[in-house]
């Protein structure tokens, strides 16, 4: 098959945008009326206000929620990830993305201006949204029920980031400084040598960590580096610098310029540049639990210290043309994240209680993401609308020269005995290269029937196409430090290791040699999705709205790799028929009743399909499953909404899902009986049922003295149950004589939280110049959920509740200056992943059940902005 031709075809075929179906297709904003001597004065509010967004939610036929630009500002939200956690049932979990209704990130999908977007990290389903600054966001749309013009990859939610609309000209500069009670001004904060310089600040130090030129573009062949090559081919040092960590800082500049183009047209230009620097320190448990003769014991008991210096950059350039029924938008979005990470471990591994070890990783995780987008729409008359769009993405993630060394834990870290060999000196190179990604959409909509005295046409038919092509080349290679001649121990300073290594190379005691498997270091993953759809929206009267849709989506995934013995070509090619129906009944002008039914699918995260075993120095590894299958989901939602005023709402949503072949993370002993491997399996099916509750209440209802207070709360309560697949039965079944599968404990879906709660209390007042100030308390928690399914006699591993309370103050001092003050994680809860207490074998761990645990510290952040 010619994959190049398939890729090009995907881009140039027309496709669909994420359309919005509402009772009022004109999207009028909330109107305020004030009577003066019998004259009614009407004014239209800003479409980005919380009131307007709530009004849009009320009118939409599908269950759509949004976070407005006003709410983003009020709550001191600095990035998209923070903004999405303010929505019912959405939480963020410690660097693992967003959970919707307790479902892990793999069940979500991301659109940017209606176009599909790949992940810039193989360990996550979507872009790390904390990299996306909110200065360029007009609105965050969240679709929690499926409609056929959305991609079929849908079970939790589809997020659509709408970049800033060009309504008026302005320029803004913003500077932020923050401190953390654990990380800031810490002495002996460890960073890679060179990470603190100008090149490190721009993320350019990754060039020094590339695979050496002698092996870079060649198949591994156990290449042995000469003395000169061992000294000079590796540009990055093993040394680390001990510094005093500085406050976290960020600076952003955004300008929007709008000019007239002819009598009725407008041209707008948007430019935004943001740069941030952050220091993070954590320490805590990093343990493993394994069967040791049908007794669960600590196979690893480690204390881990982590030093992370993270640099984030983003640039957005947008141009827009608008003239009557014509809209054309061009966007270029660049995101870069560079994390320089030092991790120190102390303790024992593999049940070797008397052998206390010290080992360190020195790595850089760097991702670069460039998204070029062109979208356009043309309205012809009152009835016809055409939409088209396409994007091209350059995308790369790498861990270049991940250095690992290990020795017996020394009393004196400046004079420690170190031996070469036995895998004590390793350099790893992981590269996930997005060779090609393209996404496109096209849609034609026509309004049918006659308005009569109505404000809308009674029918709308939409047909369209959307799709994407994603091609990744993945490489994972190893270089080892090998002893030469008589292997006597040397003495090192663990922070200044490089000079000792250089001296050993000079004296023919050490050299480097590639140890990559020449048959299994490389893989290619091809993903092609092409879909056509049709939607028919019928409004028989002003109170009923019925949307019926159908989608035919072809999903082809090809994985090419070698298992070390022979080449493999794993191909999955299936067309899914995905129907959907949404019905809304407006009981009156304040009450809505909604019903939604649909079938969708879930595609795995990239790492879940990658045919590699990603190795960590603590004898843990992550192994993708190239045979993993897409899940098939059956969804039903029944929702009642009540809008007592334009700023208040109450809602109750009952939902249920059946997920066939649900994908789950599992932890089990590795094949060589040393350490644990995390891998991924399909269950047979999972059933979920739950309720979402949401309310926004003005406390002025209680007392006039509280009229400046608004209280908002949302909560999700969910039950889940899993029927295991055959691979899971083999993994989870303990080796007890007479044990059968019916004796396995019932469990919920991996990653599904039994409850999530978000709440905020807002106080807002305006001064004599009608400029507002707000104070908000924001709270978030989710219930204990299965982090990973256990195996070989152990219970599951549970991610325990993490209570987060934030305080945000914002003051618009005058028309130019504004300030924000934010305190995050006031409660400073401990993050914990623990072994459950329902194990099949006896447990002897001295009451230590922590797989991982640490504190994050409390963050204090001050931001000042000037608009001109």
Image (spheres, helix red, strand yellow):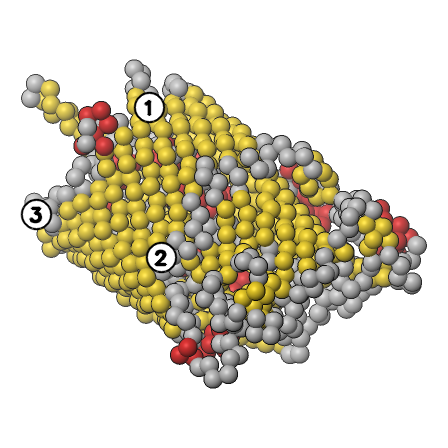
Q: Residue furthest bottom?
A: 738
In the displayed structure, 759 sits above or below 789; it is: above
Whether residue 140 is situated above or below residue 606 in the rendered picture: above
Q: Residue at x 35, y 57 (%)?
A: 754
Query: Is 827 placed left or right of 686 in the picture?
Result: right
Can see residue 747? yes
Report the residue marked by disc 3.
452
Identify the image quadrant of residue 105: bottom left
Disc 2 marks which residue?
Answer: 754
State yes or no: discs 3 and 1 in contact (Cβ < 8 Å). Answer: no
Q: Where is residue 81 in the image (x, y as percent from the top left)?
A: 44, 44
Secondary structure under tag 1 reads strand
In this rendered view, identify the residue nearer to me: 321 or 151.
151
**Mark 3 and mark 2: span between their CA atoms?**
49 Å
Which sits earlier in the primary sequence, circle 3 or circle 2? 3
Point out the image quarter for the C terminus: top left
Residue 4 is situated, as x and y percent measured from the top left of the image, at: 53, 65
For label 1, the crowd category at 10 Å Cα-Cα, with few meaning under 14, some 14 to 19 and many 20 or more, is some
């Amino acid at each position: 098959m010619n994959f190049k031709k398939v890729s090009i075809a995907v881009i140039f075929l027309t496709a669909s945008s994420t359309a919005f179906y509402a009772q009022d297709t004109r999207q009028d904003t909330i109107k305020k009326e004030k009577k003066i001597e019998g004259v009614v004065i009407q004014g239209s509010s800003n479409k980005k206000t919380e009131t307007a967004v709530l009004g849009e939610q009320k009118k939409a036929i599908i269950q759509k929620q949004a976070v407005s630009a006003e709410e983003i500002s009020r709550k001191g939200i600095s990035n998209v990830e923070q903004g999405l956690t303010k929505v019912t049932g959405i939480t963020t979990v410690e660097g693992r993305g967003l959970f919707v209704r307790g479902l892990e990130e793999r069940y979500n999908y991301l659109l940017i201006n209606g176009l599909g977007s790949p992940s810039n990290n193989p360990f996550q389903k979507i872009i790390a949204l904390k990299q996306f600054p909110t200065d360029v966001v007009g609105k965050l749309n969240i679709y929690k029920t499926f409609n056929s013009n959305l991609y079929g990859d849908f079970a939790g939610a589809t997020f659509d980031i709408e970049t800033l609309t060009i309504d008026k000209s302005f320029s803004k500069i913003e500077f932020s400084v923050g401190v953390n009670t654990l990380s800031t001004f810490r002495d002996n904060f460890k960073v890679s040598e060179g990470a603190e310089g100008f090149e490190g600040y721009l993320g350019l130090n990754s060039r020094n960590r590339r695979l050496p030129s002698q092996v870079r573009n060649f198949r591994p062949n156990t290449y042995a580096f000469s003395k000169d090559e061992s000294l000079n081919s590796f540009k990055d040092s093993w040394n680390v610098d001990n510094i005093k960590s500085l406050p976290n800082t960020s600076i952003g500049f955004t300008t929007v310029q709008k000019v007239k183009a002819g009598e009725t047209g407008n041209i707008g230009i948007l430019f935004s540049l943001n740069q941030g620097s952050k220091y993070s320190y954590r320490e805590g448990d990093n343990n493993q639990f394994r069967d040791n003769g049908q007794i669960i014991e600590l196979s690893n008991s480690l204390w881990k210290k982590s030093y992370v210096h993270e640099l984030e950059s983003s640039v957005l350039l947008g141009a827009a043309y608008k003239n009557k029924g014509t809209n054309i938008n061009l966007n270029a979005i660049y995101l870069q994240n560079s994390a320089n990470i030092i991790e120190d471990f102390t303790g024992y591994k593999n049940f070797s209680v008397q052998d206390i070890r010290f080992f360190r990783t020195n790595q850089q995780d760097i991702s670069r993401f460039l998204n070029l987008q062109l979208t356009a729409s043309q309205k012809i008359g009152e009835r016809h609308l055409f939409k088209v769009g396409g994007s091209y993405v350059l995308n790369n993630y790498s861990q270049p020269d991940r250095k690992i060394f290990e020795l017996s834990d020394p009393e004196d870290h400046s004079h420690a005995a170190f031996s070469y060999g036995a895998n004590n000196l390793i350099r790893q190179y992981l590269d996930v290269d997005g060779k090609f990604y393209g996404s496109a959409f096209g849609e034609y909509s026509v309004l049918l029937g006659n308005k009569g005295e109505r404000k809308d046409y009674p029918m709308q038919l939409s047909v369209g196409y959307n799709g994407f092509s994603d091609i990744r080349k993945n490489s994972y290679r190893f270089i080892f430090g090998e002893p030469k001649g008589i292997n006597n121990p040397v003495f090192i300073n663990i922070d200044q290791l490089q000079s000792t290594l250089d001296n050993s190379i000079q004296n023919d005691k050490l050299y480097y040699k590639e140890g990559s498997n020449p048959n299994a270091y490389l893989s290619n993953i091809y993903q092609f999705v092409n879909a056509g759809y049709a939607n028919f929206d019928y409004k028989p009267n002003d109170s009923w709205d019925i949307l019926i849709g159908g989608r035919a989506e072809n999903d082809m995934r090809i994985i090419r790799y070698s298992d070390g013995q022979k080449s493999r070509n794993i191909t999955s090619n299936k067309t899914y028929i995905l129907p959907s129906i949404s019905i809304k009944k407006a009981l009156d002008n304040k009450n809505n009743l909604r019903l939604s039914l649909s079938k969708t699918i879930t595609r795995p995260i990239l790492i879940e399909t990658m045919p590699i075993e990603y190795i960590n120095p603590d004898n843990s590894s992550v192994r993708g499953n190239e045979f993993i299958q897409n899940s098939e989901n059956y969804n039903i939602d029944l929702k009642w909404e009540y809008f007592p005023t334009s700023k208040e709402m109450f809602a109750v949503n009952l939902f249920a899902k059946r997920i066939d072949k649900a994908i789950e993370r599992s932890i089990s002993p590795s094949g060589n009986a040393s350490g644990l491997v995390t891998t991924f399996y399909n269950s047979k099916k999972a059933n979920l049922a739950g309720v979402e509750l949401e309310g926004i209440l003005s406390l002025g209802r209680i007392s006039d003295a509280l009229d400046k207070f608004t209280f908002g709360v949302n909560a999700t309560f969910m039950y889940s149950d899993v029927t295991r697949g055959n691979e899971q039965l083999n993994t989870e079944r303990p080796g007890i004589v007479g044990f059968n599968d019916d004796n396995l404990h019932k469990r919920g879906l991996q990653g599904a939280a039994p409850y999530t709660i978000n709440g905020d209390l807002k106080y807002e007042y305006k001064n004599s110049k009608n400029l507002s100030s707000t104070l908000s308390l924001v709270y978030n928690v989710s219930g204990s959920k299965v982090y990973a399914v256990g195996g070989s006699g152990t219970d599951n591993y549970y991610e325990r509740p993490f209570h987060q309370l934030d305080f945000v103050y914002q003051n618009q001092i005058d028309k130019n200056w504004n300030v924000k003050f934010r305190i995050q994680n006031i409660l400073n809860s401990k993050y914990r992943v623990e072994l459950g207490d329902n194990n099949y074998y006896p447990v002897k761990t001295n009451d230590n059940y922590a797989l991982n645990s640490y504190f994050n510290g409390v963050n204090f952040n001050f931001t000042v902005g000037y608009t001109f």
